[in-house]
Amino acid sequence: MSRLKVYYFSPTGGTQHVAQHLGERLGALLNAKAEYHSYTLPHEREEMPAFGADDIVLWATPVYAGRIPNKTLDYVRQALHTQTHNKSLALVTFGNRAYDNALAELVGLMEDGGMQPVGAAAMVTRHAFSDTLGAGRPDPGDLAALDSLAEQVAAKLASPNPHPSAITVPGEAHPEKYYTPLKTNNAPAGFLKAKPSCDSTRCTRCGRCVNVCPMGSIAVAGGRPSFGGICIKCQACRRSCPTGAIAFADEEYLSHVAMIERTFAEPKRTEFYV
Ligand SMILES: Cc1cc2nc3c(=O)[nH]c(=O)nc-3n(C[C@H](O)[C@H](O)[C@H](O)COP(=O)(O)O)c2cc1C
Ligand code: SF4
Ligand code: SF4
């Protein structure tokens, strides 16, 4: 029995949700045992994955600024560099703006690393920045698209041809730039250095935010969280806080959120490639 190895980076849970849906469906169709691995937290990235030659690899990542999140890129590149030429699936989630080059970059890393990508999908999920963009996604139509992908990939893998046809996805496999976020006035929004803040009157000192930061950048000082180190704006801390004590007050960031909510309200489609 072959194994389906599912890896995901998912600070706010959307990517994990769709990776598990696809993993379950594909595992059942391939009669393969699905194994799930998060690489969201720092300690989860301390070891590189090890793949057996028969393992099928499903790799899932959110889109950040039109690409694979910059701070995870080295880990993903190394993890997908294998001697075993595994068949693989690429899955990206995006918050209804655009996935730009992210899917092509992920498929490209698989090919550069010696894998054989057999399927790929770009799924609309809730935008981590917003409660309106991508709200309610994935919906039943999105999940049905994933089910079709699983069925078509299973049929492709059942073919006696040991070298399944390559897939073609939109975008650049080796992009140089990231999407430049804009403000409501269409000027670039400079919020690279923005960090969350904590309202001490609402914080119950539960410590949950400390344990969800993918960069390990939250510490407890004086009984409540302090935000040092790198912040990738993933929103894990803000969305995990049970009392709503965490917020991003940076004006450039807030203007960007207002811009995307206004400009990208029209629902985008989930897309898949076999
Ligand atoms: C820093 C950052 C940048 C993002 N950039 C994009 C983008 O370029 N296009 C887009 O449609 N969604 C973008 N998103 C939305 C995420 O792709 C989406 O919310 C994703 O589902 C988050 O995955 P998670 O729930 O697993 O954390 C961005 C989110 C964050 C946090
Ligand atoms: S501090 Fe930044 S990187 Fe850490 S969880 Fe919060 S938003 Fe994400
Ligand atoms: S999750 Fe919220 S309430 Fe808990 S320690 Fe962090 S800021 Fe305070």
Image: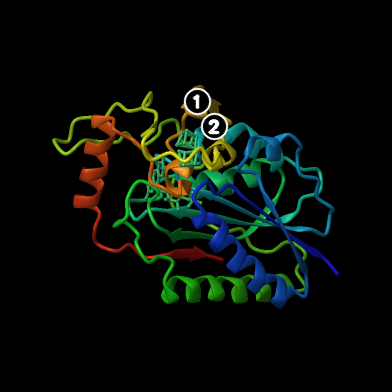
Quarter of image, res 207: top right
Would you say the beta carbon of the disc 1 residue lies within 8 angstroms of ligand 2? yes
| Left or right: 247, with 113 as reference point | left
- Answer with left or right where residue 47 lies relative to residue 209: right
Q: Quadrant of residue 149?
A: bottom right
* Eye-nearest disc, 2 or 1: 1
Residue with the mark numbered 1: 230
Residue 153's place in the image compared with 228, above or below, is: below
Name the residue located 42 percent from the left edge and 36 percent from the top edge: 233
Q: Amino acid at mark 1?
A: Ile
**Mark 1 element type:** loop
The answer to which of 265 and 108 lies nearer the viewer is 265
- Whether label 2 touches label 1, CB < 8 Å: yes
In the picture, the quarter occupied by the C terminus is: bottom right
> Dot 1, how many residues are within 10 Å of its Cα: few (below 14), some (14-19), or many (20+)?
some
Camera sees residue 134: yes
Name the foreground residue: 248 vs 72: 248
Q: Position of residue 110 (x, y in %)?
A: 64, 46
Q: Earlier in the sequence, mark 2 or mark 1?
A: 2
User: Could you tell me how far apart the alpha carbons at marks 2 and 1 are, in whole angstroms?
Assistant: 9 Å
Amino acid type, residue under disc 2 in the picture? Lys
Write down the residue under mark 2.
71
Side of 14 relative to 109 (left or right): left
